[in-house]
Image: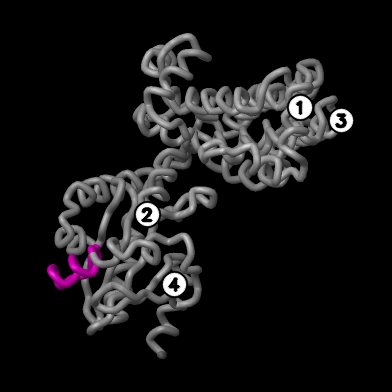
């Protein structure tokens, strides 16, 4: 159909998946640009029917929100319904992404953040889709009113005012979130050179303002980056002597920079060099490669159930041999290491997120909140609630 050809182009241009379904919502088909896998619209018949039912009742496009941050859309054209999403207007935490995947019974081993988009852009997309299908015009503020999104309308209007004011200022900057920061720091700790190169560039572009003068801001950012990278490298297995030697080098280099370009390049090299140091250290350290592979598997799968047989199969050795090697290298059992790793991740979430204890317990994969509480207290010598009360802090920025 010519109409679907246009929709495929719209889908590619806006980066939002579009599917079409019959009135019953039982059958849904992709337009072909985006995969049907791992999308709640293809997985959940209940979600499809809810969107279709609301659209029929209102007789206008539906803007449907879940988890207060994630949006889906539905536009009716004759007997067909065009469903779209998910997209979100705000950054989601690890916990929120995990809950989102669980709610719609999608594989939590393939979790990814839904695409981000401003509310204004979302509404313009729906307006454009509606006009393309029905030849009728509907304005973003009408869409919000018809969908009872009054609070969003107020926030959007305030956001537009703020955006205009920021556009007038050459000192405007956007702070990255703790989640984005944690991605980069985890990459350093794990020696993941490829990933740190990809994520660090985006992070550096969004560092918050530490000084009103841009050059001083980059200099201050470089000092903070070097400090954080040094800590993560040591946590990743680099000897403190080697880590501080590299830290001293970069601190000296900061004083040698004379231009913004030199400072930005130095920040990028700092991320790379510390990550490469971790990767090289892991290749030469006394721990066996089996132990390192086991730790890597745990760091990538700690928020799922982890079974010894799965780790052994992934590495390619027997369970018994893996247990013996890991115990010889680390002095602890694999299951104890997994529990300790989960507690450390939970502690980070308690400090830096607003997730509830129940949500954190579920995310780091404890059987119950009470089990989480007892294990956490065993390792941290205080309850999760006490830990949060003592260490909770606001996001810190570069």
- Screen quadrant of the N terminus: bottom left
Observer-nearest of 207 and 85: 85
Give the image location of residue 296, x and y in percent: 68, 37
Residue wearing tag 1: 324
**Residue 272 visible from this viewpoint:** yes
Q: Which mark is residue 104?
A: 2
Q: Main secondary structure of the magenta part?
A: helix
**Residue 262 visible from this viewpoint:** no
Q: CB under 8 Å between callouts 4 and 1?
A: no
Mark 2 or 3, nearer chain start: 2
Q: CB under 8 Å between callouts 3 and 1?
A: no
Q: Residue at x 39, y 57 (%)?
A: 87
Mark 3 or 1, nearer chain start: 3
Per the rendered image, the range of residues in magenta is 50-62
Please tell me whether residue 56 belongs to the stretch shown in magenta.
yes
Q: CA distance from mark 2 to mark 1?
A: 39 Å
Q: CB under 8 Å between callouts 2 and 3?
A: no
Q: Residue at x 49, y 38 (%)?
A: 176
Q: Residue at x 39, y 66 (%)?
A: 42
Residue wearing tag 3: 284
Judging from the image, what secondary structure is the residue with disc 2 in? loop
Judging from the image, what secondary structure is the residue with disc 4 in? helix
């Amino acid at each position: 159909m010519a109409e679907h050809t246009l929709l495929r182009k719209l889908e590619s241009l806006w980066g939002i998946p579009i599917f079409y379904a019959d009135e019953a919502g039982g059958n849904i088909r992709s337009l072909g640009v985006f995969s049907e896998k791992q999308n709640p619209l293809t997985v959940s018949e209940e979600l499809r029917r809810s969107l279709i039912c609301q659209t029929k009742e209102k007789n206008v496009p539906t803007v449907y929100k879940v988890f207060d941050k994630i949006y889906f859309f539905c536009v009716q054209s004759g007997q067909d319904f065009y469903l779209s999403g998910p997209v979100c207007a705000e950054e989601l935490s690890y916990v929120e992404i995990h809950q989102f995947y669980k709610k719609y019974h999608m594989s939590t081993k393939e979790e990814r953040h839904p695409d981000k988009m401003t509310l204004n852009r979302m509404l313009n997309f729906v307006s454009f889709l509606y006009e393309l299908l029905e030849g009728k015009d509907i304005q973003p503020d009408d869409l919000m009113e018809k969908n009872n999104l009054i609070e969003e309308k107020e926030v959007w209007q305030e956001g537009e005012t703020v955006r205009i004011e920021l556009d007038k200022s050459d000192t405007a900057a956007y702070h990255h979130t703790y989640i984005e920061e944690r991605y980069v720091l985890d990459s350093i700790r794990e020696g993941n050179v490829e990933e740190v190169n990809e994520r660090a560039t985006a992070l550096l572009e969004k560092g918050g303002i530490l000084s009103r003068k841009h050059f001083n801001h980059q200099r201050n950012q470089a000092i903070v980056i070097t400090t954080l990278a040094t800590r993560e490298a040591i946590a990743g297995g680099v000897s403190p002597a080697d880590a501080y030697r590299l830290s001293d080098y970069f601190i000296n280099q900061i004083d040698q920079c004379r231009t913004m370009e030199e400072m930005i390049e130095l920040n990028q090299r700092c991320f790379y060099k510390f990550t490469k140091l971790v990767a090289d250290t892991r290749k030469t350290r006394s721990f066996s490669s089996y132990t390192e592979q086991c730790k890597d598997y745990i760091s990538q799968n700690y928020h799922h159930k982890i079974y010894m047989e799965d780790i052994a199969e992934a590495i390619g050795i027997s369970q018994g041999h893996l247990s013996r090697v890991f115990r010889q290298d680390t002095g602890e059992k694999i299951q104890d290491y997994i529990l300790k790793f989960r507690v450390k991740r939970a502690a980070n979430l308690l400090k830096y997120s607003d997730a509830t204890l129940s949500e954190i317990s579920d995310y780091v994969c404890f059987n119950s909140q009470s089990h989480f509480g007892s294990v956490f207290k065993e390792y941290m010598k205080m309850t999760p609630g006490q830990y949060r009360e003592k260490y909770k802090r606001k996001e810190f920025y570069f």
